Each structure stands twice: as C-alpha cells, then as structure tokens.
Image (cartoon, coloured by chain):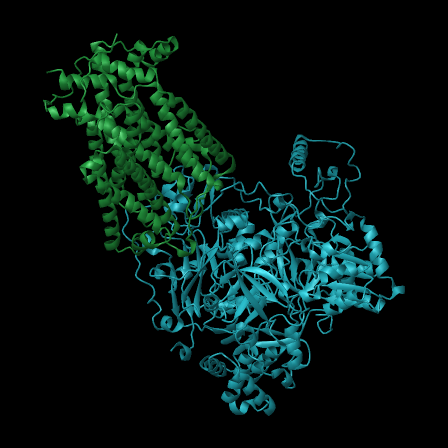
Chain colours: A green, B cyan
Amino acid sequence: MTAGPVEPARLWPTPDFSAPADQVALLPRAQSDAELSAELLEKVLHPPRWLGTAIALTGACSAVLAACVVYTLLTGIGVWGNNIPVAWAFGITNFVWWIGIGHAGTFISAFLLLLEQRWRTSINRFAEAMTLFAVVQAGIFPLLHMGRAWFFYWLIPYPSTMGVWPQFRSSLTWDVAAVSTYLTVSFLFWYLGLIPDLAALRDYAPERWRRRLYAISALGWHGSATTWRTQRIAYGLLAALAAPLVVSVHSIVSMDFAIGVLPGWHSTIFPPYFVAGAIYSGFAMVLTLLIPARRLYRLEHLITTEHLDKMAKMLLVTGSLISYAYVVEIYLAWVGGDSFERHMLLWVRPRGPFAPLFWTVIACNCGSPLFLWSRRVRRSALCLFTLTLTIQLGMWLERLMLIITSLSADFLPTIAHGYRPTVIDGALLVGTLSFFLFLFLLFLRFVPFIPVSELKALQFELRGRQ
Amino acid sequence: MPPLKSAARDSCLDPAVPEFDAAQDQPPSELSRREFLYLSGATIALSSQALPGCTRAPAGKIIPYRVQPEVIVPGRALHYATASTLDGYATGILVESHEGRPTKIEGNPTHPASLGACSATEQALLLQLYDPRRVQTVTRRGVPAQSRELLRVLRAAGDAKRGGRGVHLVLPPFSSPLLGSQVAALQSRLPELRVHVHAPLSRVNAWRGSRLAFGSVLETRVDLRQAAVVLAIDADLLARGPEHLALARAFADARRMSSAGSPMNRLYVAETAMTVTGAMADHRQAIAPSEAPAFAAALLHELCSLLGSDTAAVPAPIRSDLSALAGTSSVERRFTHALARDLAAHRGRGAVLVGDHLPPVVHALAHAVNALLANGALSYAPSPIVLSEADSFGSLRELRAALDANSVESLVVLDADVAYASPADLELESLIGRAKESVCFALFPNATWATCNWRAPAAHMIESWLDTRALDGTTSIVQPLIAPLYSGWTPSEVLAALLGVESPSAHDLLESFWRERRTRDFESFWEMSLVRGTIAGTEILQSSRPELSWNWRSFLEPRARLQHEIELNLVGDSRIHDGRFGNHPWLLELPCPVTKQTWGNAAQVAPALARRLNITDGDVLELTQNGRSIELPTLIVPGHADGALTIALGWGQRDMASTESFGASGYRLMHSDERGGTTVRVHATGRREALALSQATMQLGESADSILLVSTLERYKAQPRAHQPQRKRGLSMYVPDAPRAARQWGMTIDLNACTGCSACVIACQAENNIPSVGKHGVLEHREMHWLRVDRYLAASDSAPRVMIQPMTCQHCEKAPCEYVCPTGATVHSSDGLNQMVYNRCVGTRFCSNNCPYKVRRFNWFDYHRGEASPSELGHNPEVTVRARGVMEKCTYCVQRIRNAEIRAKVARRPLADHDVHTACEQTCPTRAIEFGDVNDPHSDVAKLRDSDRAFQVLPELGVEPRTRYLMKLTNPNPELAK
C-alpha cells in the first residue's frame, strides 16, 4: 500500500499555480507516483556503496571529538587557547556558527511553507535534517565551554530545593530557553513531516527488521484521510510556531554580545544582523550538502538547477543584508562619539593585529556573493559549491573576529592580549564537522531525504490538473 | 597582639614538650559526654591533617592540646613579632599564625624599617618556609648522615689546638649582636680563622665612599619628609635598600597633597635602567653607569659656582679636578644647572642620594654636596653590620687564592651561595671541591650546596631564634613560629658548634647572650622585646655632622669615555634580589614593577640602542665579556640609558632544586674588580625567545583621560577642580535593587603616592591563596593575581613619563559582571561588595568578558592540585581554595571585613574607621591605598573620595566603581619644563 496523496488540508485558499515555468523547472521529468516512490525509497533501501565507507570515516573522526570533549572535561578549559581577556573564543564561535547554520532548515521549511514557495518541497527535509544536526553540534559548545560543565542544569529554571533560580537578566539563560525550544520544535517539525515516508518505507522494506524499525518509527501511520488531515494541520501549526523561532533564536544569541559593555559588542543592530547572517550561512550549508548529494544520488531531475538558482538568490539577498549591517555598524561607531567603540571598529578591526581576519571576512561575506549577480554562476553547481564554502568560512571567521577583537583590546590597554588557538580547539571544530557529517550520512542512510509524499502532492498540484 | 613568647613552645611540633602528660595512659576518671565528643572530634580533625616534616612520631599529634594553651582559640589567628633580614639589615615583621601554622607575613608597625609595611620579598618568606624543595637532610658526599657526625666535623674544625689554620668561614652580611660576639669569640679562639662576608649586593661601595668622605664607615640616613628637593643618582631608594619601606612612606608623606595648598617635594633621578624611583621622578635623566662620577662632579662644580663664598671649604685642586671631570659629563648642562639651582634654592632642605653599587667617589661627591648644602634631612651613623669596618667584605679573592693553593682544610658556608652569586672570574664553583672538608648550610640545594661534601639544611627565618638589627641599629629578636620542619641549623648553632658547644640550641644561645647583657628584670625585658618585636634603646646614636675630608682627589680622574661600546649594568633584581629567591613561584611570577617581565630576566636596552643594533623585543643576544658569555632575550625599556645594557642578577640558577632555570645569570659577566661600568660585546644570535610579560609596553592613546588623570602641581594649584569634569550620575533606567546597609565599603588609591612597588600584589596573593601559573601560564595571559599593577607610558621613548595604576576589582555599584551571570554567582552585598559565590559559579566567563577593567580571574586548571606538601599549610584558612572552572577576583578581603565586624559586635562597640585593613592596604609602604566605610563622612576614605583629585576609571560607562583613584601630580622644575 502506498501512502497515496489525499487532498491536503487547506489552511488557506491555494492560489492558482498554473504557471508552466514552475512545473518544468521544478519537476522536469514526468513520473508516476509509483515511479517516484520506487526511485526515492530505493535509495534508502539500497544505499550506494560509498555511503558505508563515508559513515565509518566520519564516525572515526567523531571519536576524536569525543576524546577532545572528555579531555577538556577532565583537565579544564585551560587546554583551549582562551585567556583573560579573551575568555571566549573558538567555543562560542563554533556555537554561534552552528546555530546560525541551523537556521536555514527551519527558514526553508517553515517560512517558505507559509509563503507557499513550492520549490522548497524537494529540499526541505534535507534542510531540516541539517538544522537538527547543526543545532546538536551547537549545543555541545555552550555546555563544554563552561568551567564546570557538570552543573549545566543550574542554567535551567527548575524548582531547586534551595530556592535558587537562574539569573534571568543574563542572556545566557535566554539562550538556554531559545536553543532548547528551537531544538525541540525543529525536531518535531522534521519528524512530523517524516512520518508518512517512514510509513512508506515500512511498507516497502524487504527485510523484517527494517519493517519493524520503520513500523515503530512511523507511529502507526495508516494513511487515512483523517490522519493526513491531522498531519497537515499539525505541520502547518508547527510551521507557524517555528517561523518566529528563526528570528528569535539568533536574536537572542546575538544578545550574548549586545548586552555586554564591550566596544564592538554593545550594539543594537545585532539581532537583525545576526539573523541575516544565520540564514546566510545556513543557506550556504544547505547548498554545500545539497550539491554533492544531488550529484551522487543522481537526483538532478528532482533538485534542479532552478532550485539552485533560487537558493543562490537567497544567498545574494542575505549576503547583501550582511554587507549593509557591516557598513551600518562601522558608520554608527564613527558618528557615535564613543571613542572606545570608534577605536575598535575603525582601528582595531581593520588595522590592528587581527586585520587579516577582518579583511578575509569582508572578502568572503561581502565580496563573494557579488558573483551571484551572474545567472551563469547561480546555475553552475561547481561555482555555487565553491562560493558556499567561502561563505561558510567567512561566516565562521566573522564570529571569531567579532568575539576576539572586542575581547582582546577593550578598554584598558594594559590588559590587551591576543589569542592563539590550541590543537584541541582545532580538533573540536573539526570533530563537530565530522560528527555533523556522520549524523547527516546516517540520515541519508536510513531516511528518505526527499519527502516522497510531499513531492507526490506537489506533482499532483502541478500536473494533476492537466 | 597576644603576649606570648614563642609559638613553637606551644605548638605540637616542639620536641621540648613531653609527648603525653604523666597520667595520659590512664583513661580519664570521669569522661563526660561533652568531653568525649570534644576529644573524639579533635582526634578526627587532627589525624586528618597530619603535619608532614614533623620529626615526632605521629602518635604525638593526636591530641596536641590536651591542655589547651590559653591564647590559642581555634579559628582565631595570632600574630607574633619577629624580623626578617636581607643583606644584614632587619625589617620588623608580624607573622600571622593559625593554630600553629604561620600563614601570612605583615610589617611590624613599631619597627622603624617597616612602619607596618612589608615588601614583596619579606612576604614571600612564608611560602619559602613551606617549600617542599628545601634541603631536608644532612648528607655527606651524597649519603645521608647524622647531625651529630656533622657536629663532630664542625667541632674538629673549631678545635682551639689547630688555631683555625685552613679554616674558612663564609657568611652573609649580618648585624646580629649574638653572631657578632660568636664571631669575635671564634676569632680570638682561632687566630688563623678567615671570615669572608659575602653578598653580591652589599653596601661596600657606600661604606668605602663614606670612608673617603668622612674617614670611617658611616651609614647615611635620610628623612625624606624634610627634603624639598631630592636627587637620586642610580639609587632606587623607594624600592631597594635597607630602609626603603620607611623611605617610601616618608617620600609619599611629602607628596600626600591632602589639600591643594599642601607642599610637595621634587624628585630628580639620574639613572641607567628605569627603576621604581625613576618612574616616580619629576625629572629623570638617563645616564650610563660610567657617567655617574662625571655627573656628580658636574653637579658639585655647578654648586661651587652658585654658592660662591659658601663653598670656600672646597680645596682649589679639587675644584680644578671637578671642573675637568665635569667637562666629560654628557648630561645636558641645562639639566645639571637647573638641578643645582633648585638644590641651592632649597639649601638645607635637599638630599642627594647615591646607589649602593656606584663607585665610592660618587658617594664621596654626594656627601660633599650634602655637606655644602647643609642638608638637614641627612644624618650619619655607624653601620649596624658587624665587620663592616673590617676587610672581610669582598675577600672572596682571598678565598679563591687559598683554594687555589690547596690550603683550605675546612670551608664552612653559611647560607651564602658563593659558588653561584659571585663574580665568574673567581671560579669558586669549580674550586670549592679543593677544600678538604667543605660544609654548606643552605635552605635550598643551590650551586654551593652542590659543590660541598657536607650538605646540611639551614633553618628558615620563621624557624629560628636569632637577633638582628635595622639600619638605625634597632635590634629585634627573631623568634620562631614553628619548630624547624627539617631540623635546620641556625647560624648561631653552627658558630656555637665551631666554638665547641656540645649540643647548641639557638634559643638557649640567644637567651643566655641577652641575659648577660640585661641582668636586671630579664624576664620582662625578654617578654617585652618579643611582644614588641624591637628592643627599646638599641638605636645607634647618630654621629654629629661628620667632618668632611677632601683627600680623595686621586679618585676624581676622568675616565676615558666608553665610545661606541655598550656598557654593562648589573643590578639586583627587584623581586628575587641577588638570586636567593630564584625559585620562589610568587616572586618569579610577580611582574617586575618597571618592565613587567615575569619568570626570567632580559637584556634591557634603550629603544635607540635597539634600533642601532636592529633588534627587537625577544631577540636573543649573546653577551660576552672576558671570554664568558650568556644568552638573553632583548627587552626594550623606554627611558633606559642609551649605550648601556642592564641585566638583573639572580637568574639562571640551575641547581635551585631541580626546577627549570629561568633567564641567565648575570654573575657570569661579573668581574671581581667591579660590579658595573665594564663593557659587554653584543651579538644577535638570530633566535627569538618569548618574553613572559604580564603586559605590553603601552602608550596611552586618545582615551587616556578616562583611564587616569595626571597633572602638574602648578596647574592643580591654580585650579584644583579643573581636572574634575562635572560627572554627574547619568540618567539610568537600571536602579540596583539591593538593600543598602548603613556601611558601604569603598577604596581609594592615591596615584601620587603609589610607586608601583607591587608589594600589594604579593600581599593579596598570600592573603587570598592565589596560585601561581608558571611561565607558560603568563605567556598565555592566565595570571591569577587579583591585583595587578598597570603601567602606562607617555611622552617620548627616551624620556617617558611613567604612570602606575594598581587595578583590582572596582566593586562597581552597577556591576556589569552581575547581570550577565546566568547562575547569579556574582551578586552585590548590601554593604556594597561585589561578591563572588564560588559554589554557584559554573564558569561561563561572561562576567570576565563584560568587566571593563578585566580584573576577574578564571581557574583554567585545578591549580592547587599540583601543590606538593607541605605548601598547602601556608594557605589562609579563612579563604576558600578555589576549584577548577570557577571565576575569582578581589573581594575587598571580605574575610577581614567580617572578622572585624564580628570582633566589634562581640566587644559591643561600633566599628571604627581603621578597624578593617585589606591585605593590599595593610602592606602598602606608601599608604597609597585607603579602605573604609564611604558612608561615614568622617572616615578617611570618604574624605579622600571627596577630594579634588578623586576620579573614577572609565566613568562614561556609568558602572559607578567603588574604588576611586586620586590624580597623580608631578612637580616639574619650571626652569626645565620650558
């Protein structure tokens, strides 16, 4: 039994999408539902050979992460390169970067769902999974960077017998709420969309253990119209809940800096600036993963050049927002009259010891998206892939630059000191990258990464009427 | 101060106390429940903290206070007066003791060389006592031996029949009357005994200078309160020397500026390397070491022409020599002239002081200047140092000759590291082995210890009975606070053994010595002396103004100018002195007050010389002199004399108990002829070495005014409030909601008085159990000091203006650290303290990031875990030892505040103004730090906060710091200011 498409629950009247352009661009090859199901589910049931090797490799690298985490916990934060004044560095950079990456998934799924952008269908699950795994990586760092990580639960408001609560004026307690909410909602959203496909796998899988596994995961889905209707309503509601989270999470993360008094941190433009940056790096990460996956799984007919083009346009928009934020930040410092702020933004960053960092950030984040004005670049997978890597590097360096320049030279010149990361710092970053890929490859291995049911629904919408 | 004679007498560790009372082995006839609990509690408590190093069987420590000594109340610290001795001169100290464990060293307010203050080195004696690397056993050729065998060896060497032939005794300079009488007795008993007194930083040159000028060894004493114009020629009088604590106090008193109308002295400094005193100078002139005689001569010459007929006493030949020598002075005539005019204008109220190491003729010239000006601030008195008149000083060459000739039968070295801390051309390290029998008593396994065949532990000052004298002769009894941890020998015991005493005991020797001298009412004399820490009436009477002789013309020969060569300037280190503290973690990590270097020394050069040699900070130089060379990294010091290179002595000791060696030894370049003034060949090796600087050399930029305020006396007097911008409390939506108690603690730091000597840093470290992080830790900027001394430079590289600013937690009323802490681990107390709750801290470090003063310290590792026993015994039991992963910072010594409050409450009296002293305030030689209740309008701190000079650091942030600073003033000579 296939989980056949039923008329989805309508939250609002669907406008008439009869433009043939979309149809050709997003689903160029006409396939029957059965063909689609077979093709996409087959990829899970009979994964390509390289996948096993890749999973083993990234798994092994993830063990390095585990080793570094244990070493840090047993020895102390001293094994990192942090110092006084640079008390935050790689750890928080990684946190902000990963959580930023985690924004694209929800943005694509929820925002674009609500805006009824049909091109999201082929890539949304991909993006959601990426979100989830990125947030998992992000979650490692705030815990690990604490001097006494084993007391992390003191940041959670629970009714302690001693009547002690977290200190709610601190943005770190807001972080705990924001990130944990985001993780929960992202997971629910992802899983809710996944259920029909898990049910399909349950029905398709040849081996017994696999049927069992998918049967449990599918939570008793039987594809009745009522079930579909309930699922669509829940999905829509969760999308409505997730969409504001996209904005709130990174706004709150940005307040880790904005509520500080440091020159270069103490700024009201941080929330929008961080959200734009987050979506920017998130889209870059989706493309980074999508382009090779599309190629390796031969899915060019489902994830088309049109998809890439649309994603690239998003990159261009968010990249421009970021560039604008940089300009505004510097301009405000210049006219703001605070000599420390001016010193930070007009001297320390562009001309101080970390100037190479600053200019790399500008080149990566403001320079490289300019190429996306060209349609040819937008539609070339290789160019896009290179650009997205550049952007990710740029966004990571931006967070590092933001954190360490302000800390290393704040108010009193006597305490100024640079920062040099240690091997452990580097290993933790590489370790989370591996762990992220590891989780992602597991996702590719066990779950249909293109939402089969949604794609069929889309096909019905686009072609069914013909 | 409780009237108790000796801590050791009451301590469990004293072997003289019988192990158990007579009826101890019987069960108590009636054991009440309370008594049972008391005993079992004590048993558990004490068996769990067995004192290591105790020579007693452990069973003896189970119930130490079967009869509790009257004065010991568990939990209440006791203070005992004693004295520490450096190069023979005493500084009175108070040692705090918790249940028999010395835990902190403070200055003794009744002692003239301390006045309640204490320098970093004296405070560091505490950790030295507990250092597990101390020499612990007697060995003979590396094999453990019995003390009585060593006693036999010593008695054989002191055998009167041999008459002391071939017996050489090496001692550090000492002022102890007991040792003096013992040495005299030895010399009469053993006529051929040779006594060598050795200290690399002794005042021999000053004594020789006074012999030139006055015909006898006289110590110059100065009362800086009476001096309106002070000139220091390469004399770091505010931070070095036997009386520097008292001098610093007097100097600061003359600059206190309690109101705009107060007088203020003027300090001129001519020196080679930048020193603490130089940094305080109103006018500073960099001179190479060889230029000092010419400069002093030029000054005297100027004065002769200025004072005219009043200088008739100066003989004509001297005048002509002076003018010839003055002609070679490279110091700008304008400076010398203005200085001379200033001195002449303040006739009788000036003082010219000369560094101990400068050649005798400079001292003689200074004596002449002071005599001509009839400077009333100066007085002269015989030296308290025994043998200062004799030729024992500097007689190491004689020892070397004797060793060379293989004529040394017995060499006894008492706590003097001659093998390391002596000029390299003597090659004592390799020659000591030639002595038939060599005995070394040392605190640490140093180079001399390693070369002697008998090696024995010396007793630490805190374990010893001795007496000692300050520069002015005031005598103190040194009393122990703990029984010797490693059965160390005191010098008096060694000398007594040489004198043939059967089983010498330092206490009995000392007591009988003084009993002979104070026959009347000895007991109360003894008690009073121990309680006060000084013996009344022992000051050396000042000589009436000594007659100046002028027969030192031969010394006035102009030396050939050392053109195109680099002069070598070897100086004592500001922290480890001559190297005796060369393994002391507190002092190694204490940033040099001037260069801010830690864990090592460097070749200090002027920026101009560095440019000429094309070297920069950290470039390793090979320095060669007389065929011996050392390698040191470059450190560029603005204000250093061009054409000279300064090396601090005392570093690069390999044998100080198997630690890594830091820096390189300047003694390798020292020649037995003279200490400085020679040249050195410099060769850049091309390698680089990271300098462990606690801060970079910082020029103050555009935002200087919000960090610190400096002005001149003239401007300040004209408009006392001109520098006080109208800083009202800005509008704020954030009102702290903490209830406000009646008492509000606050601090002021007078930048006009602070010399940057850094004694407060060590006081804070000792009081608050602050760990050292090692060279690597400093390189990574992870120092744990709660109090740091910031140094800023302004003006030019060649004549920098130095500004010092001690920086610690400012206890902001609207503290930015508090609102960012997610767990509420840093909160405000109702009496205005920014508190740190270690237990609640999870270590996010957000508070440190948000602290504009960056005074918070993070425990990156478990720093206390690596501590080897027994060093943990020195911890202050009233302060938590912080664990890994928590933040810490200055608490305004909250334990002292609460203690004082409790004491006042128990006594049912209100807390008075100076009832609470923070550790930094208490030890500050210049009393730059004032602490108290800012809500009490009559308190000193409240008055200072309201003074014209008070300012906040970074006022624009609106954090309302509780610590305020008082503006620094300089008093430049108008003639030179133009």
Circle count: 0
Horizontal relation, residue A243 to residue B87: left or right: left
User: In the image shown, does B292 or A148 lie closer to the viewer?
Assistant: B292
User: In the image shown, does B137 or B634 lie closer to the viewer?
Assistant: B634
User: In the image shown, does A367 or B246 lie closer to the viewer?
Assistant: A367
- Quadrant containing the N terminus of chain A in the rendered view: top left
B927 to B878, vertically: above or below: below
B911 to A432, vertically: above or below: below
- Residue A117 image point, x, y percent: 17, 27
Horizontal relation, residue B99 to residue A341: left or right: right
- Residue B634 image point, x, y percent: 51, 61
Hey, which quadrant is residue B587 in on the image? Answer: bottom right
Look at the image and tell me whether residue A251 can be seen.
no
- Quadrant containing the C terminus of chain A in the rendered view: top left
Residue at x-position 77% and y-position 41%? B19
- Residue A344 image point, x, y percent: 32, 53
Horizontal relation, residue B399 to residue A120: left or right: right
User: In the image shown, does B429 or B816 lie closer to the viewer?
Assistant: B429
A162 to A38, vertically: above or below: below
- Residue B373 image point, x, y percent: 54, 83
Look at the image and tell me whether residue B680 can be seen.
yes
